[in-house]
Image: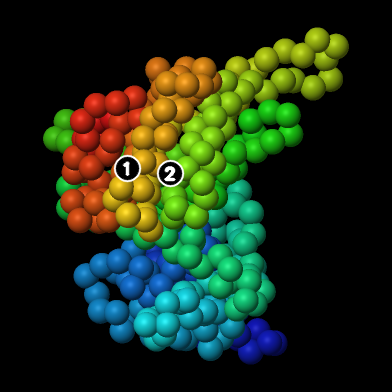
Amino acid sequence: MTRSASGVPAAADLAPSPSEPLRLQVLTALALHRMATTGQLRQMLRPDSSRQLVSRVLNKLCSTGFVGLTPLPDSGRSRTHAWYLTPEGSRLTRDLPVLRGRPPYPITSTTAASLKTPHTLTVTRTHLPFAADARRLGHEHGPWDWTPEVSHPIGEGERLVADAVMHYTVVTDDHRRKLRAFVEVDRSTMSSERLAVKLIEYGRLFQYEAQTVGRRRPVSTGPAWLRWYPVFPRVLFVLTSASRTRLAGRISDLQAMVTQHPLVAALAREVQMGAAVLEDIEEHGPSGAVWVPLTGGEPRPWTDL
């Protein structure tokens, strides 16, 4: 293996190849998903392999300076760590095709990583049941079809940052149905009202129209979201880290926002929106009847909202 002057492998040694070595996939996954545990990376990249296979790759990348690790805050799981890219690893992956257009996300210290760990790992945890469901059902959804922290302008210099954007293709014998979703992951760390206000931001994104510059009279170029999506994505809320009663109340507050705010009501007439408990998604799969429509009705699969 060729080494640079700093003693770490040269970028060419980790360039994409037809066989896509696991070390490259691990680096790409950490660049895209920001952070993950060994178990999450195994489920994401090699679900049928042993944990030791992924561990060996991670330990090698750590010893050569491309990834760092931080212990999980739960003292009962002191041997479990979250892995993240170092600035060196971030630079190495910046020009990979799957990451083009993504902002760099270097974490320069274990302290900085630990501050981001709980939410980032929960977002990654939310992705895994969708990937497992796709494998089981013969649908198309893999590690690169889930993009965390996607930002869009909503006017007045403000931006909406979705926890993740998901691309998912339902495949049947004679039909391919392409679905997209904005995913919001709620760990019950903010007030229920603040969570529901996120729906207003999605309503603003739905109606926001970019204006051409350099004209005396601004001319609309149509909804800004059409620059990225042929159809406005579904909006999915995934809730966890509270009692069933509290989570049900938070879902009820989301439903109330749909009926009470005109922007959200307009969005709900055109866009499917639902909420589910993360533990239910993990137990029954996202294709189970675990999603509560924000417009009301019985729980159903996310594809049938």
In the image, 211 versus 6, the foreground residue is 211
The quadrant the C terminus occupies is: top left
The residue positioned 40% from the left and 42% from the top of the image is 250
In the image: residue 218, left or right of residue 295: right
Q: Residue 202, how many percent across, how many down?
A: 52, 31
Amino acid type at circle 2 is: Val
Determine whether 204 is above or below 55 in the image. Answer: above
Determine whether 101 is above or below 256 in the image. Answer: below
In the image, 170 versus 155, the foreground residue is 155
Amino acid type at circle 1 is: Ala
In the image: residue 23, left or right of residue 285: right
Q: Residues within 10 Å of mark 2 (few under 14, many from 20)?
A: many
In the image: residue 4, left or right of residue 69: right
Q: In this rendering, does residue 133 appear at all?
A: no
- The residue singled out by tag 2 in the image is 183
Which of the 4 quarters of the picture holds residue 107? bottom right
Name the secondary structure under disc 2: strand
The residue positioned 52% from the left and 50% from the top of the image is 190
Name the secondary structure under disc 1: helix
- The residue singled out by tag 1 in the image is 248
- Real-space Cα separation, disc 2 to disc 1, in angstroms: 18 Å
